[in-house]
Structure formats: C-alpha cells, structure tokens
Image (spheres, grey):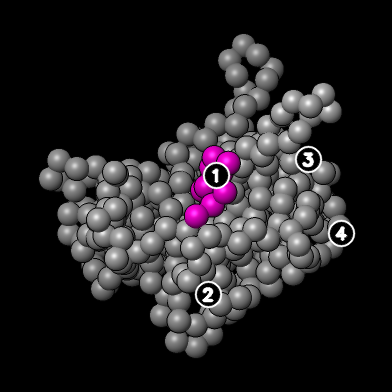
Amino acid sequence: MTDTIFIKLIEKQEITDNVIIKQEDCSQVNDNFKNEIKVKESLQDSEQIPCPGNANIIKLKDSDFASYKYIEFPEDTIFLEAIAQNSIYKKGIAYIPAQRLVEYHATNGGKIFKKETHLYAVAPHMTHAQHIAGPIATPCGSTEISIFGSHLNSQGILYMCAFNRNSILALDLTKLTEPPVFVECQFEIANIPAPNDLCIDPHNENVLYVAAGKMETMCCFDYKISNASSGTIYKVTIITTNTDDGSSSSNNGRYFRTEIQARGLDTLAGIEVINDQIVTAQLYNVIMQNKQFLESSTIVNWEGYDYQGNVWLADNIDTFSTTDCSGEGNNEEKLLVIPA
C-alpha cells in the first residue's frame, strides 16, 4: 500500500534568498515593478510548509484500522477523486461525486453498462455512503462527465471540475430532492482546459481559482487538445450581469470573467487559498503566489524530495478552519497537504 502523509502548516519560518523564485514573463509584472516587489515581500512573510524529511509523518496502513475506518460505496463504483465540505452550509457532512459503471437492461433482454456520476454524502459515523443525487448531468442533459476536484461554498453550490469537458459544473445542493433522482447542474463555466482541482476565495465566494492546463494546437494539424502538463491557474469571477470587459455568458443569467492567474507551470494537482496566498500542488513540489496580482512571481514552498532517497507527490490540498469563510474574526486556518 502506498504511504500517505499528512502535513500541517506549522510555525512561521524565514524564507531566505536561496528559495527559488520563478519570474513569469508577463506585461503586468514588467509594467508594474512596484507590484512585483510587494508580491515578493508578501511571499517572504508567508508561512513555509515543512518538507517530508522534517515533518511529522503519519502513515496509514490497514493495520491502523482502529484509528480510521472505511465508508463503503456501491460495488459498481470505478472512480473517486473529489471530496468537498463546508461547515457553514452543513456541518459534519462531506460530498463525493462517484463515477459508476451502472447496469441497465436492454430492450432485447440483454444488459448494457453506462458510465454515470452520482453524488454521495458521507459523515464520520457512516459505514455506507448515502446516495443523494444521480446521475448528474450538464445543463444540456449530458451525463458524460468525469469529475476530478470539487469545492462547496457556504450557500450549498457544489463546483466540480469536469475534466473531460474542459469546464466547471455547478450544482445547487439546496434543490436536491428525495429520493435521489437524475439532476442537471444549474450552470457550466466553459473553456477551462483539463481542470484538476479548484477552490473558492475565502474572502469572496464569487471568485474561483482553478488548477488546470492549457489548450494547444497539435503540430501540423488545425486541431486543439487540452494539455494538463502545461499547468495554468485560472481566476474565474462569477458576476450577475454581462459586461463589455471580456466576460462570457452562460445559462440562467450568469456571466463569468476568466483570467489567467499563473501560467507556464508543470502539471497541477491541488489548489487552495490561505489568506492572500494561492497554494498549489505541482506534484513534485508546492508553490505559492499572491492572489492580488495576476501572473506575478511564484515561490517553491515545499519540495517532494526529502534527501533520504524518497520522493513524495503532493496531490490534494485542503484547509481546516475554526471560523467561517467570511475572513472575519480570529481565523485559525491550517493547511493540510496530502502527498501519496
């Protein structure tokens, strides 16, 4: 079994000049050197994530069953990737999209199997996940979706990375009914290549940050593909009315402005926002960027190689907080990195 480690964000450490600074080639930085200085100063004041060699590592094995337990999903489940929770919307409950290979009876008496995504709720006391919706469909009714990362806001809107559609789907959990039935997402944010994970700005729930890829044209062919290895962070702002500043319209009267927060990165796996810092897992390391400035410098904050012959892969990132997401009060957020 592959070891899994949990690393908490610990005490503030001084970042020296030896830390790698990656300078992005962008007009905004070149045209505003003062902003770049502010970004670097902000990154230097941020907390540094300990590397595995210096961290308190917790390894999970089947023999540790007394300290954790399994929650069962249907036997036809073939893919679990995302989990989302928000204590303001519903405390103690997490939501997991599960891709299943569902069996149906054909008209000729045979059997057919369809890939579908269903939504399940889980809680610590459960032994079996609770089916609450599904199959999940896009706003146009298609059930051909593969969900990777997800995030839930305080109003019950579940945002999901539809990797195969190069888009973000939004499902309003407050509109789900019992028993679980086929459900269409309320809206879709298109043109986000190979989205792997996303998060919500803790100070503004109308702003999403998406760890994704880039659309590229195949050599000698006028054919575009989404390339997950060309890591790109997108900033998506959800607005209520259309504007003339590049926003693209969608259904249900919603409009979106999509901007590039960072580009030229490696394959991205997880993303979160801590205060003003965007923390992104880049598989073999973790990088940070000040969210206030588009395409500003990133800093390598965590290295997967522990100088003991081991290489840890940083995948999911999540935050835990004792306060709400409004950013008010004594916010005691801690960062949890899960390399495997």
Q: Which mark is residue 326?
A: none
Residue 248 visible within the image: no
Mark 3–mark 2 distance (CA, rounded to whole Å) = 31 Å
Q: Name the quarter where the N terminus is drawn.
A: top left
Circle 4 Cα neighbour tier, 10 Å, few/some/many (<14 / 14–19 / ≥20): few
Mark 2–mark 1 distance (CA, rounded to whole Å) = 25 Å
Callout in the foreground (4, 1): 1
Earlier sequence position, callout 4 versus callout 3: 3
Mark 4–mark 3 distance (CA, rounded to whole Å) = 20 Å
Q: Which residue is mark 4?
A: 253
Which of 251 and 37 lies nearest the eye of the viewer?
251
Tag 3 near tag 2, CB within 8 Å = no
Q: Which mark is residue 75?
A: 1
Inspect the image, locate mark 1, and give the three-letter code of the amino acid beneath it.
Answer: Glu
Q: Which residue is mark 2?
A: 92
Q: Name the magenta segment's main secondary structure.
A: loop
Which residue shows up at 71% across the image and 65% down it? Answer: 173
Q: Which residue is mark 3?
A: 142
